[in-house]
Image: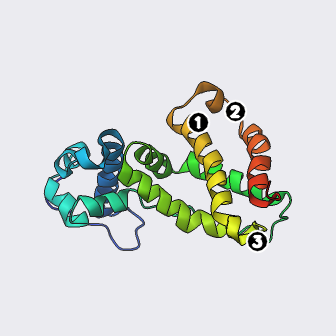
Amino acid sequence: MNGSDSTSTVPGSGAPRRSDATRGAILAAARERFATDGYERATIRAIAKDANIDPSMVMRYYRNKEGLFAAAVAIDLRLPDVSGADRRQDAGRILVEHFLDMWENNEVLTALLRVGVTNQAGAERMQGILRDQLLPVARQVCPDPEQVPARAALMASQLLGLALTRYVLRMPPAVGLARAEIVAWLAPTIQRYLTAPSP
């Protein structure tokens, strides 16, 4: 996959564009390289080699390493609206089930976590995603607006801790938990962080 990146797809055929496949290969290679080498050591040339394309193609789509990194770790968590849920019992379950769906069906999120725990740029990107997407959800059900940041951080500690042990480190006891078990264990904790009176 190098050289020309034109597509012969007939509009409306439903066939993937060659450019989409190229972008997908670049981003997959970039996530792996950023997670393995860190932002500073990862190079456009190495990422292009991993994707089996010419480095000029990477530059064509993303201009520079900063642009590539931003694209590689961009993700919409698609968090559910919990404002109509029973604040005492449903919000935690809804969020845990949603995150399980995300972790198990979206490899980008796992890659982002790997990048986030290996280099500062990745950590900052993950902080931004959680700040921009998780805080508004916590704000919907938190009884005290001033406590929203702390409660969201506590919620993230549980969700990211599960993801790290189950999907990145793949610790056997965590991997072996059934979905229903995870929800049963974790949902009450998330619910308490969101809605319980401040200690």
User: Residue 33's x, y, as percent?
Assistant: 30, 44
Mark 2 and mark 3: Cα distance apart in space: 29 Å
Q: Is residue 52 left or right of residue 109?
A: left
Identify the amino acid type marked 1.
Arg
Tell me the amino acid under the disc marked 3.
Ser
Q: Nearer the viewer, mark 2 or mark 3?
A: 3
Q: Which residue is mark 3?
A: 83
Q: Classify mark 1: helix, strand or loop.
A: helix
Q: Are marks 2 and 3 in contact (CB under 8 Å)?
A: no
Horizontal and vertical percent position of residue 71: 36, 62
Looking at the image, the residue that sits furthest to the front is 199
Q: Give the percent coordinates (x, y) of residue 36.
A: 33, 39
**Disc 1 from disc 2: Cα separation:** 9 Å
Classed neighbour count for the residue bearing mark 3: other residues with Cα under 10 Å, few (<14), some (14–19), many (≥20): few
Task: Pinpoint residue 26: horizontal percent, then vertical percent.
Answer: 29, 53
Please tell me which residue is depicted at 77% across the width and 40% down the height of the picture: 185
155 lies left or right of 130: right
The disc label shown at residue 177, or none: 2
**Which disc, if any, is residue 127?**
none
Q: Which residue is mark 1?
A: 166
Looking at the image, which residue is at 34% across and 55% down?
24
Choose the circle earlier in sequence order: 2 or 3.
3
Label 1, label 3: how far apart the Cα atoms are? 29 Å
Q: How many marks?
A: 3
> Quick check: marks 1 and 2 in contact, CB under 8 Å?
yes
Toward which corner of the image does residue 58 lie, by quadrant? bottom left
**SS type, badge 3:** loop
Q: Residues within 10 Å of mark 1 (few under 14, many from 20)?
A: some
Q: Amino acid at mark 2?
A: Leu
Q: Is residue 1 visible?
A: no
